[in-house]
Image (cartoon, rainbow, N blue to C red):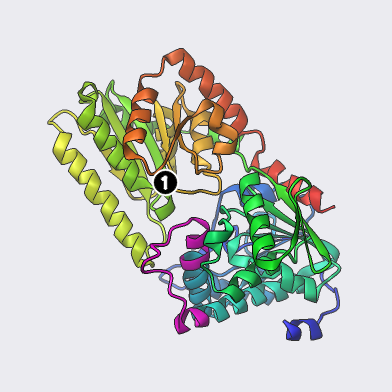
Amino acid sequence: MADLATERPDPSGSAPILVASNRGPVSFTSEDDGTLTLRRGGGGLVSGLSAIEDPNAVWVCAALSEADRTAARQAPDGRLDLAGHDVGGQAVRMLDIDPGTFARAYNGVANSTLWFVHHLLYDTPTSPVFDERFRREWESYGAYNTAFTEALAAEAAPGAAVLVQDYHLSLVPGRLRELRPDLRIGHFSHTPWAPPEYYRLLPDDVAAEVLTGILGADRAGFLTRRWALAFADCCEALLGAEVDRAALTVTYRGRTTALGVHGLGADADFLRERAHRPDVDARLATLREAVGERRTVVRVDRTELSKNIVRGLLAYRHLLRTRPEWLDRVVHIAFAYPSRHDLPEYREYTAAVQRIAHEINDEFGTSTWQPLILHVNDDFPRSLAAYRLADVALVNPIRDGMNLVAKEIPVVSDQGCALVLSREAGAFAELAEDAITVNPFDVIATADALHRALTMPAGERADRTKRLAAAATALPPQQWFLDQLTALG
């Protein structure tokens, strides 16, 4: 940190607005002849950034693959737009970070430590173990954050606004504050935040450095007030910071960081238009043929440990075992798309999902009825088709920063759907009144909730869906992004 401060650069950049995130708006693949093919991404950040009309705004991201690294090396200072790539009218600086450093920072710390802490995922009798290997990973996490810090400092115009995204980059605000005290810095956490007693699983110095890193921001944003207050609780308990819970501020060592709550919503216009294109219609016809006149329970998730897919399948099995009236009258459409398969826990979890799905079909299936349709290969049009077909949406995460699927399905559903929603999803703060609430660990209660949802009168279901859709789209991605920018001043 001292080295950063002594090498403070002159503010010579030209970007008045900057966004920093691990994943950028584009990615590359390498063809057999060595040429690079660019693919634009989607999601809330990409949609949100499109709200910026300033041509000098810059998005700083990491190269995630060897093809990405090749593209970054071939571009001047990693600026893909200056190398002639069509990046959607945005300026993008892609960082060529050493692959080993990136892997240790991304897999070792971000996804295997910070993600696990904030989602309360550890099997604490055996993990975590913070040993020499972790210390090497933490050193790489610091180097990764420093690479972003230096790139942002170089690109930012005097007094620029910088919006740093998520747990991958929790050290950037503090380090950037040292290099460029003139900047207005925001940090946004897309995950939950752990309560102090669980957050203390981290080594004391690491726990403190993450908190002080985020407190380097003028403003720290969260998806719900619950997560913002959990962060404040950690600052108070671990740092002795002064917390004003009414004003949502944290004061530490003479600096005050405001906490903001921005509940990212669904992009209604995009979803409704995209859900009625021919490729979605074709997949919907295929699903309708498989389902017939039966009712549908739909879930769409990554095979992420926090999504609680296994207990959802167990609840569906319990429904079929204890409510024989649903035999041959319901189909569970479960899309569980691959996630983080470079981590063994995720490979094992995906295998468990597939095993239980096979058991359900073996136990209940007949020559004319497949009670569970499981797909583990990602297909966005097929997901939208399932959204449209859903009578019931099952969203039962152990813990989730928001869960946009809970917001998207009511927006797209053709006939209206009943939402079975975990009280541990961030979306619960906005959707609870019209959802059927479940404790995500209680399989029997979840099965009962599915029965209640399946038997909900059509009129009630339609009315609830309208209210759910209105709440789900209250803060669409572009406005979500602009609200944070405005709040920075």
Which residue is under mark 1? 301
Q: Can I make out residue 20 in this image?
A: no
- Label total for image: 1
Q: Nearer the viewer, residue 30 or 166?
A: 166
**Residue extending furthest toward the left:** 367
Q: Nearer the viewer, residue 307 or 358?
A: 307
Q: Where is residue 179? Give x, y as percent.
A: 79, 76
Are there few (<14), some (14-19), or many (20+) residues within 10 Å of tag 1?
Answer: many
Q: In the figure, 438 relative to 481: above or below?
A: above
Q: Can I make out residue 434 in this image?
A: yes
Residue shown at 53% from the left, 73% from the top = 105
Instruction: Report if residue 103 lies within the magenta region.
Output: no
* Quadrant occupied by the N terminus: bottom right
Residue shown at 48% from the left, 49% from the top = 399
Q: In the figure, 225 relative to 268: above or below?
A: below
Amino acid type of disc 1? Answer: Asp
Quarter of the view holding residue 429 = top right
Q: Where is residue 26? Give x, y as percent.
A: 57, 59
Q: In the figure, 58 relative to 439: above or below?
A: below
Residue shown at 59% from the left, 53% from the top = 190
Tell me the magenta residue range. 112-136
Q: Where is residue 43? Give x, y as percent.
A: 57, 48
Numbered disc 1: secondary structure? strand
Left-right relation of 408 to 306: right
Residue shown at 85% from the left, 73% from the top = 11
Q: Nearer the viewer, residue 181 or 122?
A: 122
Q: In the figure, 5 relative to 300: above or below?
A: below
Instruction: Report if residue 120 lies within the magenta region.
Output: yes
Q: Where is residue 223? Give x, y as percent.
A: 63, 47
Quarter of the view holding residue 363 = top left
